[in-house]
Amino acid sequence: MRVLSSNYELYADMSWRFQTVLDDFSPEIEHYSIDEVFLRVPFHGGSELTEMGHRIRETVDGLTGIAVSIGFAETKTLAKIAIELAKRSRKTGGVLDLTRSRHQNAALERVRVGDVWGVGPAYATMLERNGISTALELRDADDDWIRRRMTICGLRTVHELRGSPCIPFEPTPKTRQMICVSRSFGRAVEDLSEIRAAVAWFTGRAAEKLRRSRLAAGKIAVFVSTDRFKDVPQYSGSVTLEVAPKSDNTIELQALAMMAMQKVCRPGFLIRKAGVILSGLEMIDKVPLRLWEQQRYETHRRLMAAIDELNDRFGHETVRCGLYPVDGPWRTRFDNVSPRYTTDWSQIMMAK
C-alpha cells in the first residue's frame, strides 16, 4: 500500500476533460456528486443510446484513462439501477439501456431493495420483513401501503421504478454560484499574523479562479473555526462584506478579506480551519463600468492578467499579491504527490 498526497491539479484536469466529453453529447447536465452526473438526451428508439454510451466511454477513456459506467432509463432511479447492473455485468461493456426495455423486469428482479436509490437501511429492513426484497417487488407494491410506511418520498421512488419521473432533473448552472477556498491547518493557530497570511493566500487563490472563469464577485466572506474534536474553547464565526463595485481584482478582494478577518477573529481561540467564500458572481463582461476610478481598475486588471500569465508560464505563485510567507501551517502538504501527467511537460508518462 502507498500513501500519496492529494493531487488537486491532476484531479482538476481530469474533471475538466470529463466535463468536456459530456458537453459534446448533451448541453443539459446535472452534477449529482463528485463522480456521478445525470444527462438528458433524446430517445428515438433502437440501439442509439447504447451506441452513444459506448462512444462516451471510449472518449472518456481516451482523454483520461478512467473507466466509466453508463445507464439509460426514463427516470433517475431506473438510470441508477442501470448503472449498477452495467458495473456488475461484463456482457454490457459498461453500458446498459433500460429505456422502454423488455428486460426491465429481469433487471429489477436482480437488484436488492436496499440497493435502490432512496431506500435506506431502515426502510430496507422494514420492506424485507414485509416480503419485499427486490426492486421489482417494490415497484409492484400497493401505493397506499407504501405511502403509509415510507411517506410520499417512498411513493415517488416506486413511481420512478414504474417509469414515471418524480425526481426533477436540475441542470447545473453554467455560471458558478460560489467559489470557496479553505483549509484545515496542520496545527492549531492563535497568532493573528498566521491567520492573516492564510486568508490572504485563500483570497488570492479564489481571485485566480474568478478570473479563469471570467467572473466577478459581489460578496466576500471569511470564516474561521476551532477543532470541534478537541477539548479546547470552541468558536466558529464568519463575516460577509459587499464587494461594490463587483470585482475580480486580487488587491481589492484581499483588502476586504483583511477587514472581514479583523471582525471575525477572537483572541484566545486556537483556530484549526479558515476559508474565504466569494459569492454574488456575475460574468465580468456584464459588470457595468465604474462611476469612479475606472482607469485605476483597468490598470489593476492588466496587472492581474500579467501575473496570471507569468504564473502559468513559470509556475504557480512565481508572482503573488501580498507579503504572506511562502510556507505556513495552512499550506497543503505535497510530500508524496503523484506525478501531474497531463499538466506538466516534465512529468509526462514515458514508455520504456
Image: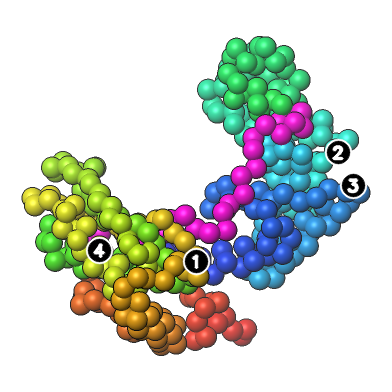
Q: Which mark is residue 256?
A: 4
**Residue range corresponding to the magenta coloring:** 160-186
Of 290 and 266, the residue lying toward us? 290
What's the distance in space between the residues labelled 3 and 2, CA to CA?
Answer: 10 Å
Residue 126: x, y in percent? Answer: 58, 17
Left or right of 84? Residue 265 is: left
In the image, which disc is placed on residue 45?
3
| Mark 3 or mark 4, earlier in chain | 3
Number of other residues with Cα within 10 Å of mark 3, as a class: few under 14, some 14 to 19, many 20 or more: few
User: Could you tell me how far apart the alpha carbons at marks 1 and 4 are, in whole angstroms?
Assistant: 22 Å
- CB under 8 Å between callouts 4 and 2? no
Q: Amino acid at mark 4?
A: Leu
Looking at the rendered image, the disc whose residue lies closer to the viewer, 1 or 2, is 1
Give the crowd class for mark 2: few <14, some 14-19, many >=20 residues within 10 Å: few
- Label 3 vs label 2, nearer the camera: 3
Q: Are marks 1 and 4 in contact (CB under 8 Å)?
A: no
User: Of helix, strand and loop, which one carries label 1?
Assistant: helix
Q: Vertically, is 68 above or below 343? A: above
Whole-Å distance between the Cαs marked 3 and 4?
56 Å
Q: Quadrant of the C terminus?
A: bottom right
Residue at the spot of label 1: 286
Q: What colouring method underlies this structural image?
A: rainbow
Would you say residue 168 sits in the magenta stretch?
A: yes
Q: Which of label 1 and label 4 is nearer to you?
A: 1
